[in-house]
């Protein structure tokens, strides 16, 4: 399970609007000064993302929570986003070459049509099949323990 901490910033009907701090993957890496990903992360800065989740747990504004997604859905999404358009690109090109004994330009046009078709198919699948699975889910509520500051020296000794 991939987890991320978020804070409830508003309530909207049966949903809770949460905000997360977007971070680069290598902020604590020792090589972040010479790494391209670290440089890109510093360039983009830390951004906050807002999402809406179901408020079945009766969350209140200001609550710190942990949301998550199962890792297997990222594998499916990666296949859907990268492999499906690429496979359709090759399949259209191969079919054009075999069936029509196509020239180079027709192969290129068929490959582009395959890419566009694969991207459209990806859009349909992601909106219909994976949309619900890729929504973040509430995992648990985080409790922050703040120590009370003593008001006087006498309280500090006790």
Image: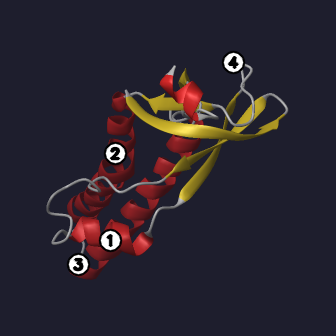
State the separation of the CA atoms marked 2 and 1: 22 Å
Placement of 9 over or under 110, stated as above or below? above
| Residue 51 placement, left or right of 28 | right
The alpha-carbon separation of the residues under discs 2 and 4 comes to 31 Å
The number of numbered discs placed on residues in the rendered structure image is: 4
Q: Residue furthest right?
A: 13
CB within 8 Å, label 1 to label 3:
no
For the residue labelled by badge 1, is the local secondary structure a helix, a strand or a loop?
helix
Q: Earlier in the sequence, mark 1 or mark 3?
A: 1
Check the image and name the residue furthest to the bottom: 105
Q: Point out which mark residue 103 bears.
A: 3
For mark 2, what is the residue?
78
Q: Which residue is mark 1?
A: 40
User: Disc 4 designates what residue?
Assistant: 57
- Of pointers 2 and 3, the one earlier in the residue sequence: 2
Q: Nearer the viewer, mark 1 or mark 3?
A: 1
Q: Is residue 106 above or below residue 3?
A: below
Q: Where residue 66 sits in the image (x, y, percent)?
A: 51, 30
Query: Which residue is at the front of the view, 29 or 154?
Result: 154
The percent coordinates of residue 63 (x first, y second) are 65, 31
Whether residue 112 sits left or right of residue 102 in the image: it is right
* Residue at the (19%, 55%) spot, across then down: 29
Q: Are marks 4 and 3 in contact (CB under 8 Å)?
A: no
Q: Nearer the viewer, residue 83 or 28?
A: 28
Contact, mark 2 vs mark 3 (Cβ under 8 Å): no
């Amino acid at each position: 399970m991939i987890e991320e901490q978020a804070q409830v910033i508003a309530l909207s009907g049966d949903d809770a609007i949460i905000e997360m701090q977007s971070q680069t993957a290598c902020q604590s890496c020792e090589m972040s000064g010479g790494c391209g990903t670290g440089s890109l992360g510093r360039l983009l800065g830390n951004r906050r993302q807002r999402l809406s989740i179901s408020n079945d747990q009766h969350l209140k504004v200001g609550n710190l929570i942990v949301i998550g997604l199962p890792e297997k859905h990222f594998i499916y999404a990666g296949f859907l986003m990268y492999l499906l358009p690429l496979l359709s690109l090759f399949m259209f090109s191969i079919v054009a070459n075999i069936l029509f004994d196509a020239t180079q330009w027709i192969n290129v046009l068929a490959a582009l049509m395959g890419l566009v078709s694969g991207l459209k198919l990806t859009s349909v699948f992601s909106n219909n099949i994976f949309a619900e699975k890729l929504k973040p889910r509430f995992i648990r509520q985080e409790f922050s323990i703040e120590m009370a500051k003593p008001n006087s020296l006498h309280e500090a000794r006790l």
